[in-house]
């Protein structure tokens, strides 16, 4: 039997619990970026937010914060095409769509799709391929919506543990899903996936959640436990602290990429596919590090 006093306490707890679950505050992302191309000095960007053949953007519009990373496929360089042009143009187009409000927060695949089809219709000639990852925070609903095509991706860390992560999309070893624009007449000879094929997910976030969005140059060189060790250094939500941690992560990934004796995640994956590979994987690296915070004007 439950006493009236105990019942009253239970009701009070239930009411308080309900209030805590319906947080009326808007959330936002405090985000810093760091990265570099494998052939460029650390932290040096090309025009726009580009590190080597990687590109990224950070944008917001009214009720949402939006992040994006893309990794241009380097093989196009063998045909005289600058791989960074495709990834950079794709990210700039997606950023413009966000700033113009031409998107729905719950549909990041739509941002990627509209951006890609704008490139296809662009009168300015553009060739190339790219992976892409889009992350959207709905400020009012406290939900994160994601779309990932290929082997870029994201991690969500809460309480020192990875609670959400993107799924890598590969056709076969070291051949990720990718968006492409091929020269006329040879479209069928160039690997190209539809943006609608992107893996999408939606989930609630909490204040203090850490979101790491990056290209494969990070994930191929740093396993989760190393990333989590670096994230422990993040003590508060101010931009300077986030920027310092993002730089620390990118620099460690860069160092490991050129260590010939290190068994990197990429090398382990290669061994799992029957290849005798050791060492890091030299690559462009882009890191967007975000913390979910209370929105302030």
Image (cartoon, rainbow, N blue to C red):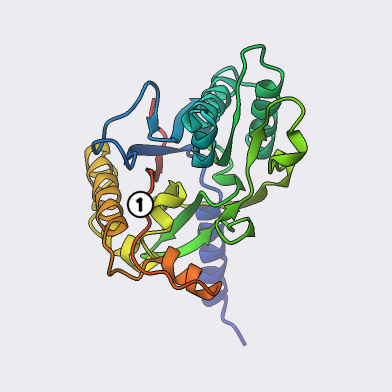
Which residue sits at x=38%, y=51%? Answer: 208
- State which quarter of the image contains the N terminus: bottom right
Residue 141 shows in the view = yes
- Is residue 230 rendered to the left or right of residue 275? left
- Is residue 82 rendered to the left or right of residue 47? right
Q: Position of residue 186 (x, y in %)?
A: 74, 33
Q: Position of residue 181 (x, y in %)?
A: 66, 30
Q: Quadrant of residue 194?
A: top right
Determine the residue located farthest toward the top in the rendered image.
Answer: 123
Question: With respect to residue 148, does 163 lie above or below?
Answer: below
Q: Which residue is mark 1?
A: 282
The foreground one among 23 and 149 is 149
Question: With respect to residue 257, does 188 lie above or below?
Answer: above
Q: Secondary structure at mark 1?
A: loop
The foreground one among 251 and 187 is 187
Which residue sits at x=33%, y=42%? Answer: 38
Q: Position of residue 70 (x, y in %)?
A: 51, 38
Which residue sits at x=36%, y=61%? Answer: 222
Q: Residues within 10 Å of mark 1 (few under 14, many from 20)?
A: some
Question: With respect to residue 263, does 240 lie above or below?
Answer: above
The foreground one among 137 and 186 is 186
């Amino acid at each position: 039997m439950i006493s009236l006093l105990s019942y009253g306490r239970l009701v009070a707890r239930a009411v308080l619990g309900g209030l805590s679950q319906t947080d009326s505050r808007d959330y936002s992302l405090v985000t810093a970026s760091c990265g570099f191309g494998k052939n460029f000095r650390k932290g040096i960007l090309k025009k726009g937010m580009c590190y080597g053949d990687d590109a990224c953007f950070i944008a917001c519009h009214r009720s949402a914060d939006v992040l994006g990373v893309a990794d241009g496929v380097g093989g196009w360089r063998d045909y005289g095409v600058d791989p960074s042009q495709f990834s950079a143009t794709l990210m700039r187009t997606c950023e413009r769509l966000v700033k113009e409000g031409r998107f729905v927060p719950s549909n990041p695949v739509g941002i990627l799709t509209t951006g890609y089809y704008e490139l296809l219709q662009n009168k300015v000639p553009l060739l190339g391929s790219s992976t892409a990852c889009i992350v959207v925070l709905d400020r009012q609903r406290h939900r994160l919506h994601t779309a990932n095509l290929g082997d870029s991706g994201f991690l969500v860390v809460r309480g020192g543990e990875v609670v959400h992560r993107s799924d890598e999309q590969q056709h076969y070893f070291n051949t990720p899903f990718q968006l492409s624009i091929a020269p006329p007449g040879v479209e069928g000879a160039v690997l190209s996936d539809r943006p609608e094929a992107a893996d999408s997910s939606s989930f609630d976030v909490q204040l203090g959640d850490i979101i790491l969005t990056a290209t494969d140059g990070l994930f191929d060189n740093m396993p989760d436990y190393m990333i989590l060790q670096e994230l422990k250094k993040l003590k508060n939500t101010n931009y300077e602290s986030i920027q310092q941690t993002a730089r620390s992560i990118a620099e460690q990934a860069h160092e490991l990429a050129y260590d010939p004796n290190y068994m990197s995640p990429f090398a382990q994956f290669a061994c799992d596919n029957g290849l005798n590979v050791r060492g890091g994987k030299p690559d462009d690296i882009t890191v967007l590090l975000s913390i979910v915070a209370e929105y302030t004007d």
